[in-house]
Image: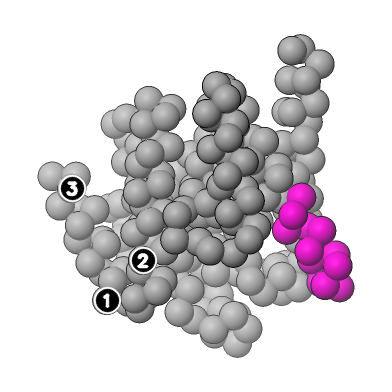
């Protein structure tokens, strides 16, 4: 039954997203399956993660500037000034809302929140929110140097026997550090939610390093 739902949603994304984006989505879905197994997630939690993986980039075809703003308006979504200053991240806001509108039976609050925070992150992310964020960054079809660096770091940590949660936290922290530094170097705005996410992760690592 579940597989039928996944297959049906994947088919919808295949039709709507185009080949390259569909391959990314398919790969995020598979990466989330691997991460879910690493954490022994099952039942509703695993299902929510997989559904959010399939739907997370549902509004990516709308162009980054005008398209996303128009979509946000038509979905009645208020965007903050900071959202508008980081246009790459707006598809997470519109994506969560459109996914819920199109698939109300599949998109519960947990799925909605995973999609909502998959770009900027935020403080106090739940485990499924963190796993979607990481899967989106490290899935194997990603070829950017930064993605390869974070992917290899995560693999190295798990190979070395790091606790899975700390491996996710450390890999995410590295991804935020890389992304935030690049935004600063490029003279671009850093979304405050990304800074909150980075500090949230850093504090987990610091507490852990004191205990160990
Ligand atoms: Fe995305
Ligand atoms: Fe994505």
Q: What element carries label 1?
A: helix
Q: Earlier in the sequence, mark 1 or mark 3?
A: 3
- Dot 1 corresponds to which residue? 15
Question: Which stretch is magenta?
Answer: 177-190
Residue found at x 20% / y 57%:
7
> Residue 169, percent across and down?
64, 35
Please say whether residue 202 is one of the residues in the magenta stretch.
no
Along the viewing direction, whichever of 59 and 132 lies nearer the viewer: 132
- Dot 3 corresponds to which residue? 3
Residue found at x 62% / y 41%:
153
Query: For residue 144, which quarter of the picture?
Result: bottom right
Extreme top residue here? 211
* Colour basis: one colour
Q: Distance between the residues labelled 1 and 3?
A: 18 Å
Query: For residue 210, which quarter of the picture?
Result: top right
Along the viewing direction, whichever of 176 and 67 lies nearer the viewer: 176
- Dot 2 corresponds to which residue? 23
Residue 9 placement, left or right of 50? left
Quadrant of the image containing the C terminus = top right
Q: Which mark is residue 154?
A: none
> Residue 52, percent across and down?
40, 52
Query: For residue 63, which quarter of the picture?
Result: bottom right
Q: How far apart are marks 3 and 2 (CA)?
A: 18 Å
Please say whether residue 182 is one of the residues in the magenta stretch.
yes
Quadrant of the image containing the N terminus = top left
| Contact flag, marks 1 and 3 (Cβ < 8 Å) | no
Along the viewing direction, whichever of 113 and 36 lies nearer the viewer: 36
Per the picture, the main secondary structure of the magenta-coloured stretch is helix
| Residue 74 visible from this viewpoint | no
């Amino acid at each position: 039954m579940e597989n039928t739902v996944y297959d049906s949603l994947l088919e919808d994304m295949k039709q709507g997203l185009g080949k390259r984006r569909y391959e990314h989505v398919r790969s995020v879905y598979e990466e989330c399956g691997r991460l879910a197994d690493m954490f022994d997630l099952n039942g509703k939690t695993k299902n929510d993660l997989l559904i959010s993986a399939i739907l997370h980039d549902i509004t990516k075809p709308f162009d980054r500037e005008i398209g996303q703003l128009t979509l946000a308006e038509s979905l009645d979504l208020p965007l903050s000034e900071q959202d508008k200053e980081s246009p790459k991240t707006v598809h997470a806001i519109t994506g969560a809302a459109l996914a819920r509108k199109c698939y109300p039976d599949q998109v519960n609050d947990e799925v909605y929140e995973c999609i909502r925070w998959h770009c900027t992150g935020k403080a106090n992310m739940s485990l499924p929110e963190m796993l979607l964020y990481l899967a989106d960054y490290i899935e194997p079809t990603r070829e950017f140097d930064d993605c390869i660096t974070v992917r290899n770091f995560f693999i190295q940590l798990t190979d070395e026997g790091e606790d899975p949660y700390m491996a996710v936290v450390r890999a995410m922290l590295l991804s935020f550090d890389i992304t935030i530094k690049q935004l600063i170097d490029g003279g671009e705005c850093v979304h405050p939610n990304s800074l909150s996410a980075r500090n949230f992760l850093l504090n987990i690592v610091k507490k852990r390093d004191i205990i160990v």
